[in-house]
Amino acid sequence: QVQLVESGGGLVQAGGSLRLSCAGSGRSFSSYAMGWFRQVPGKEREFVGAINWSGGSTHYADSIKGRFTISRDNAKNTVYLQMNSLKPEDTAVYYCAADRSWDLLTNRPVAISYWGQGTQVTVSS
């Protein structure tokens, strides 16, 4: 089992940057693929990006490709989401997620077993 805690959210102006962190508990963190999702009120949770166990494979949603970067530091049990060139439409609660699976065709976890509590990101225009 793994517990996930996000941090780094906040208020930023359009065009600015933020880095979200997700700290995982447990000694098996490096065996989990990690993902980032976001959700705005009234809408379904949306996939943002994912990274495999080693960090050697990543996949991003088209809406953020080229602006966001996912990385991980298994020695620190932490995964990061670097967000650049932020837009007002990036405003959402951002969640990190973990699962042991990884689909080689889609380059993302097949399912999600664990979720963090979320961190709010607000981008002002």
Image (tube, grey):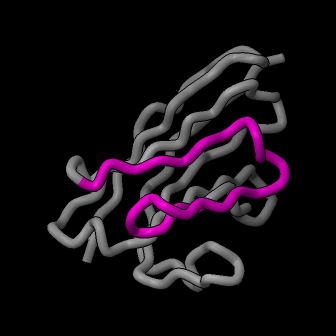
* Left or right of residue 66, residue 32 in this image: left
All told, the count of numbered labels is 0
Name of the residue lying farthest toward the front:
56
* Left or right of residue 56, residue 120 in this image: right
Which x, y percent locates residue 45?
70, 63
Residue at 63% over, 33% down: 83
> Which quadrant, please, contains the N terminus?
bottom left
Work out whether 80 lies above or below 12. below
Q: Which residue is more in the foreground, 86 or 105?
A: 105
Taking the magenta stretch, the answer to whether it contains residue 63 is yes
Residue at 57% over, 38% down: 120
Which x, y percent locates residue 18?
57, 26
Quarter-of-image position of residue 60: bottom right
Residue at 83% over, 54% down: 62
Magenta segment, which residues? 50-74
Which x, y percent locates residue 26?
18, 66
Taking the magenta stretch, the answer to whether it contains residue 99 is no
